[in-house]
Amino acid sequence: MPKKSLSRCCAAALLLLGLLSGSAPDAPPAPAAPCAWWYGIGEPPTPAEIGFAARHYDLVVLNATETAAMRRLRALNPEITVLVYKDLASTRDYPGAVHGDRDARYLPTGVGYHAAEDGHPEWFALDGTGRRIEWRSYPRHWQMAVWHPDYRESWTAAVLAEVVREGWDGVLADNDFSTLRHYSDAVLSGTADAEETDRVLRGGLDALVATAGEALRRAGKVLVPNISESRLTPGRWSAHSRHGGGMEESFGLRGDDGAGGVLTFRGDEWKQLRASAALGRSWLLLVTPVEGGRDERVGYASAALLAGPRTCWSGARTPDYRDPDWSPHQGTGLGEAVEAARRLPSGVWTRRYAHGWVAVNPTGTTARVTPPADVAATASVAAIAEAPLDLPAADALILTPPTPPASTTRPTPQGR
């Protein structure tokens, strides 16, 4: 028999054996309740916070200056993933990013301010009057020409060298944004209007993410961009998260346009997030800004609808990520998912877990839901004594037994 045919026969036999044994080659781990992570880019972490993080989080992001904290986390938990924060789109000259007339050794960006000022002033983005663009509300953050090939190559080379030298697992790349308007009303020199400015910036970020992501991948590292408003551009999440994952910093937010509902479920983003979570090969780092109980419920339950092996959620109570966040929902012990998330005719999404059930109503109107009888009978939420029940617009329901398994019960983090 020719070798080619023999190879095909062997491959078919291995596949058949895998199917008969109930497993498939390269099958991802079973989807579990969302893991926890910390976007630790605020104040330097205290020893107590490092200890808490090592016990509770699957992934932590730290500033480049926190190499000692990264190594301590690794010593306490060899399985933890630790990424370094780097900004894609700016350079900065505030104290700490520069020391007088020189750049700091550990930068929050890929290109230092003085390196650009002294050697490549063309890397600073200019507005129509020829002025550099400083970000509104972020003094001494300067927009860079992300579309410039030399900037792209310099950013990649510098970040890759630092990640490999210091031993980070990869990079959390901030400000992979869709529009400059969150930071400035400026129109780039050479563009006709804000829309063209944004197209130029998005195109530059597309290329930068691809270049840096591929270089890091070859070195065994990951690139996880903070992908802004991916629902507005079909395919953007999938393209930008393929080098190790993606971060969604506005996950599960309610719309403020009068239509109600939850923004994450609109447009193309939800489909892309579901596909990425199901594959289980890249990180989904989800952040819900939390101002009350409903925000927390919707954020966690929406993450549970997605949850795959690397789907992590955080309910951020401070906009500067000053403290490690931990939600009581993360200790309820949902366990493994026993079904895929499904959408009901009402628009409500539900998912059954080994130890509970979640439902999210992302629509702008109240919807009727009926929890599974066996879960409702033992749930910790007294309000579901009678079913079906009304689930308000942009709200969620998380049902678990009153006492979660001991192995999933975790303490509340200590403040500073």
Image (cartoon, rainbow, N blue to C red):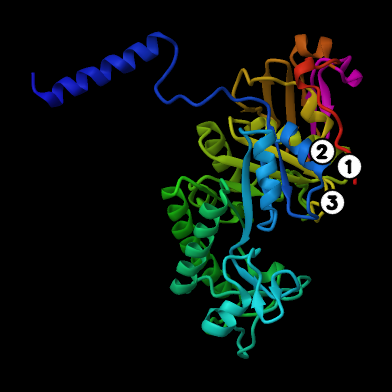
How packed mark 3 is, by other alpha carbons closer than 10 Å (few <14, some 14-19, many 20 or more), is: some
Residue 292 is marked as: 1
- Residue 377: x and y in percent read 83, 9
Query: Would residue 283 appear left or right of 330 to someone viewing this image?
Result: left
Region in magenta: 380-401
**Camera-side residue of 389 and 138:** 138
Q: Looking at the image, which residue sits at the far left?
A: 1
Q: Is residue 175 visible?
A: no
The secondary element bearing badge 3 is classed as loop
**Quadrant location of residue 325?**
top right
Q: Is residue 58 above or below residue 334?
A: below
The secondary element bearing badge 1 is classed as loop
Q: Amino acid at mark 2?
A: Glu
Find disc 3 in the rendering and name its residue: 318
Badge 1 vs badge 2, beta-carbon distance below 8 Å: yes
Looking at the image, is mark 2 or mark 3 nearer the viewer? 3
Find disc 2 in the rendering and name its residue: 296
Q: Is residue 73 above or below residue 345?
A: below
Query: Would residue 383 appear left or right of 116 to someone viewing this image?
Result: right
- Of mark 2 and mark 3, the one earlier in the sequence is 2
As measured in the structure, the alpha-carbon distance from the residue carrying label 1 to the one carrying label 2 is: 7 Å
- Of mark 1 and mark 3, the one earlier in the sequence is 1
Q: Amino acid at mark 3?
A: Thr
- Residue 47: x and y in percent read 81, 43
As measured in the structure, the alpha-carbon distance from the residue carrying label 1 to the one carrying label 3 is: 12 Å
Residue at (66%, 29%) from the top-left corner? 345
